[in-house]
Image: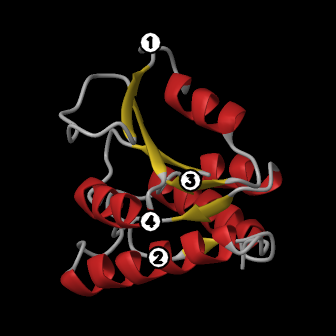
């Protein structure tokens, strides 16, 4: 079992470490540049080249039913869900086989709106409630994986 983190813009890396270490689950912090990581045999930094989608390609290539992927990237989430991984956004929202299609469609609509207008609001600011929801959701996902249950 492993947690793969799309780390370049991830606001919950510290929370991932906390939950992963408590569950004794390995973590791979994947990015285009090095990040400081805790000194632990369970946490490893993976620095990929700076090619377009290099981190996404690495994560998608490693994702399977034994992994939890942390990402806000909807297209990466879709690839990982299709590979059988449990996928969680930094705000604690899970991406599932039943929800990913709607998320991809919404992303496409928002991209079209942004292309045609001067100002379209982005996501709400990251909050303490998001952080709390993330901690709870990650803990639940790891417990499900340990029990051999499929992603929720």
Q: Residue at x 38, y 32 (%)?
A: 44
Name the one closer to the observer, 3 or 119.
3
For label 3, the residue is: 69
Q: Is residue 145 left or right of residue 97?
A: left
Q: CA distance from mark 4 to mark 2?
A: 8 Å
Location of the C terminus by quadrant is bottom right
Whole-percent x, y for residue 39 in the image: 21, 37
Q: CA distance from mark 1 to mark 2?
A: 31 Å
For label 4, the residue is: 23
Q: Residue at x 39, y 73 (%)?
A: 91
Q: Quadrant of residue 143?
A: bottom right
For label 2, the residue is: 139
Label 4: few (<14), some (14–19) or many (≥20) C-alpha neighbours in 10 Å: few
**Of helix, strand and loop, which one carries label 2?**
helix
**Of helix, strand and loop, which one carries label 4?**
helix
Tell me whether circle 3 and circle 4 mark residues in contact (CB < 8 Å): no
In terms of sequence position, does the residue under pointer 3 or pointer 4 come before the other? 4
For label 1, the residue is: 49
Whole-percent x, y for residue 12 in the image: 29, 60
Tell me whether circle 1 and circle 2 mark residues in contact (CB < 8 Å): no
Which mark is drawn over residue 29? Answer: none
In terms of sequence position, does the residue under pointer 3 or pointer 2 come before the other? 3
Tell me whether circle 4 and circle 1 mark residues in contact (CB < 8 Å): no
In terms of sequence position, does the residue under pointer 4 or pointer 2 come before the other? 4
Q: Nearer the viewer, mark 4 or mark 2?
A: 4
């Amino acid at each position: 079992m492993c947690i793969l983190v799309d780390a370049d813009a991830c606001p919950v890396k510290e929370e991932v470490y906390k939950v992963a270490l408590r569950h004794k689950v390995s973590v791979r912090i994947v990015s285009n540049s090095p990040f400081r990581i805790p000194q632990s045999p369970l946490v490893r930094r993976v620095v990929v080249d700076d090619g377009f989608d290099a981190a996404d390609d690495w994560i998608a290539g490693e994702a399977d039913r034994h992994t939890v992927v942390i990402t806000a990237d909807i297209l990466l989430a879709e690839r990982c869900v299709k590979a059988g991984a449990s996928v969680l956004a930094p705000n604690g929202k899970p991406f599932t086989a039943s929800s990913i299609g709607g998320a991809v469609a919404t992303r496409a609509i928002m991209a079209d709106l942004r292309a045609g207008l001067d100002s379209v609001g982005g996501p709400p600011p990251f909050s303490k409630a998001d952080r709390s929801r993330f901690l709870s959701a990650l803990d639940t996902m790891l417990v499900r994986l340990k029990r051999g249950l499929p992603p929720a």
